[in-house]
Image: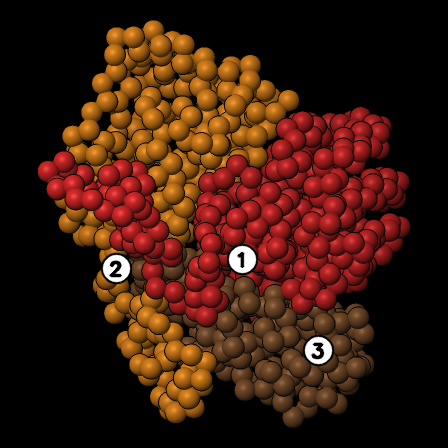
Amino acid sequence: MAVDDRRPRPTRAARAAASAAESTPGSAAGAPQPAAAESQLAPLGPGELTAPIVVPNTLWRATNPLAYDGGRPAEITHLREFGLTDAGRRDDARWGAFQVVPTTADNILDLIRSNSLWPLLSGLACCAFEMMSGATSKNDMDRWGMFPFRASPRQADVLIVAGTLTTKMAGPLVRLWEQMPEPKWCVALGDCTVSGGRYKRSYSTVQGIDRVMPVDVYIPGCPPRPEGLIYGMLQLGQIVKDKRGRWPEREIGPTVPEKI
Amino acid sequence: MDRSLKRRLEASLSSQLIAPIRQRHDQTEIRIGPGDVTDVLSTLHDSVDLRFEILADLAGVDTGEHMQVVYHLWSETSPDWLRVIVDGLSRDDPRCPSATFLWTGAEWLEREAYDMFGIIFEGNRDLRRIFMPPDYTSFPLRKDFYLPDDAARSPGEGVRHVERPYAPAVVADDPSAGIRRAPAS
Amino acid sequence: MPTRPARTSSRPKTPRPPEQSRSQDDPRIMLDREVTSDLYEPVPPYPTQTEREAEFYTRGDGEMFLNVGPHHPATHGVLRLVLKLSGEQVVDVDPVLGYLHRGVEKICENSDYYHVIDHVDPLEYVSSLFQEWAAVLAFEQLMDVEVPPRAEYIRVLSGELLRIASHTLFMGFLALDLGGLTPILYSFIERDEIVEMLAALTGARMLFNYFRIGGVNGDLNHEFMSRLGDWMSRAAKQTEANTGLLNQNEIFVRRARGVGVMNREMALRFGVTGGNVRASGIPFDVRRAHPYSVYPQLDFNVPTRTEGDALARYLIRMDEVRESIRIIDQCLDNMPDGPVMAKLPRLLRPHPGRAWGAVEGPRGMLGVYAISDGSDQPFRFRIHDPSFMNLEVVPHLLPGNLLADTMAIVSSLDPIMGGIDK
């Protein structure tokens, strides 16, 4: 019973004529509501769950629902129908058999890259201001080579996602991530990107960006202090050094690193 | 509490009010029906002793039984805020005349009320969704749109958006279960 | 983007008129008539729904759409502007919002009154105390609570400090969007000082969660007073230095003067408030028009200008910084003793009713309309954000200006997307 907003709207004259002519609410000519609106207003019984209307997702693969089990079986059948296996959690799932092969020179180059990680300006909300505070004079990230916040994803190494990710913005953000050339790393800054944060119950936010892209460093806080961001970026430098030459192995979904 | 404002409003608008004028703290509140919106707003905006030229807010409200559109206006002639409640819009097909003929700034406010409640503003040239994606099919701030209680079932799971998320688990014989309703007053 | 079909050499090369043969031989050249809509995604990718949308998305002769997308270094957060350009000149603009819509109003309907104050912070995140103030004003009307005078003075003090921080940030971002990379660094030094001061007072740097219904959370402490004293001793000179960076800069002045002129009638019709409307000649300031808190007892001016261009909006905010420093001085002189919080029950259940509270934030009038149904959660919590109305004039200010002025105009209105998108 989906309402189609794409249906061409009647003109003002037609709407006035329709509203003058109609006597019952919910007539098909002008009403925006589904005809079953009346029955959906009744309180739901304890066993009844409204069936969700699933819009097929063409932007990214869904995460594994069992990761969010919490001890109770998830009642969301539509995610299981997507047939997730572990392969669906890999970052290159979208590209099929796309392979990125690091060379032996990357063993040395990663040592160099760890000291010169160029972030992409991806400030969405409040955490963006702490990221900018971390980049300006008082707490200066330029001391570790992270001065140029590139505007173009083609020139950036690190995607620092700072701020709440909404479902409308998720598409552009994942497109940004896909546009970044390898090697690339992702840092989740702030509670909203780590796990949804204060918007855990919201209808329009993504509960943590690790549902849509692989994350290397999580920096919690609401917002985290710039010193926290700097600590996280230094940890990222350490990860780049430790995993030199092995950067394509990534998974989408919550991952806890061995060494925190 | 501006008594003279109450007298002036009763003098100009007494035929269109559907409830007595209420005043509390520094706000004066009038209630009208959806058919009188254009007349009442024009009177408030244009008449010499009322001159409510500043539109402060345009909000939609879902009271459980009806929908309302609430305008907040400000005038230099009175220290009070004026609240105009357009009551009695049905929940199935809420329609209200648009205020864009007086204030062009009402256009986006009406878009927001449409996006969140489904209230159709007749006369608004640009009534499309403003916050949600253009092909979204629910109206989030309605009282029958429930927020999920469990994070695992929340919409941002990787599906693009979930329409009509799950209702909270309610006990069958709990009289307060179901849609929240506004108080009668 | 779908790939173009490969041109094979087995096709017979018969002589053709010059324009056709050029396009057929060289696949990089595509004539206008060959560009069909199935090669590129149509703009917009769905059938247009309204008159205004159809009017906007109809391309005239020589016009193109440029998408200043949600990810852009100069839009203040995730704002998408679809520009219709004719060469360098902007013909029309369609702002697309909603990339930061987090459903705050719905979450507030499901939270306690104390929790609502925390949720309302990230709306205008650079000046979050004003959101709390508006919400608290509305709730105090619902509950008929008297706020002790010391709490009122602390509210004004912290609010004005945050207003200075917000205006200094505005100056930095306006300069950054016009290409100047230095003033933003000075802005952030200033902002870091003020925000560390407020962190000593409230415990957090940005989303303070400091105001409570009936007062504030905690009293002034030594660290806050010492930092405040340090800062006040150089505040006036620092402000002069920061504004002097840009006021004397010919490039900035010439790029901002006469650009994006908003006249008086337009400002009234659009419901614009704050520095933007005072730069257009209307002296509407909620602190004077509808005073709240202890503003009736404080002596300050409301700067007003009549030009209405981007430069006037910038200068107004710099004047307001000086006025805020005066207000802070008066607060410190007149601070009374007493409690900072009224006595309230732990579970707040106001009587059923409706209340509207409005404060003057750095961007304009921030209003909260709260409906209570007698339970411990608000029935409806509506936030009216000033940046929302300020951004609405953009489709009427941009046309006729060059693409380079777009950022000057949008920045001079000082939008914060968290508030616009709620």
Q: Residue at x 70, y 62 (%)?
A: C267
Q: Chain of mark 3?
A: B
Q: Nearer the viewer, residue A24 or A182?
A: A182
Q: Are tags 1 and 3 found on a single chain? A: no
Q: Is residue C192 visible?
A: no
Q: CA distance from mark 3 to mark 2?
A: 45 Å
Residue B125 location in percent, x, y?
50, 71
Rendered colour, chain B: brown
The dot on residue A52 is: 2
Q: Which residue is tagged 3?
A: B45
Q: Is residue C289 above or below residue C194?
A: below
Residue C381 location in percent, x, y?
54, 61
Q: What amino acid type is highlighted by mark number 3?
A: His
Residue C384 location in percent, x, y?
60, 60
Q: Residue at x 25, y 12 (%)?
A: A103
Viewport quadrant of the C terminus of chain A: top left
Q: Chain of mark 2?
A: A
Q: Secondary structure at mark 1?
A: strand
Q: Is residue B30 left or right of residue A188?
A: right
Q: Residue at x 49, y 78 (%)?
A: B122
Q: Which residue is tagged 1?
A: C92
Q: What amino acid type is highlighted by mark number 2?
A: Pro
Q: Is residue C262 visible?
A: yes
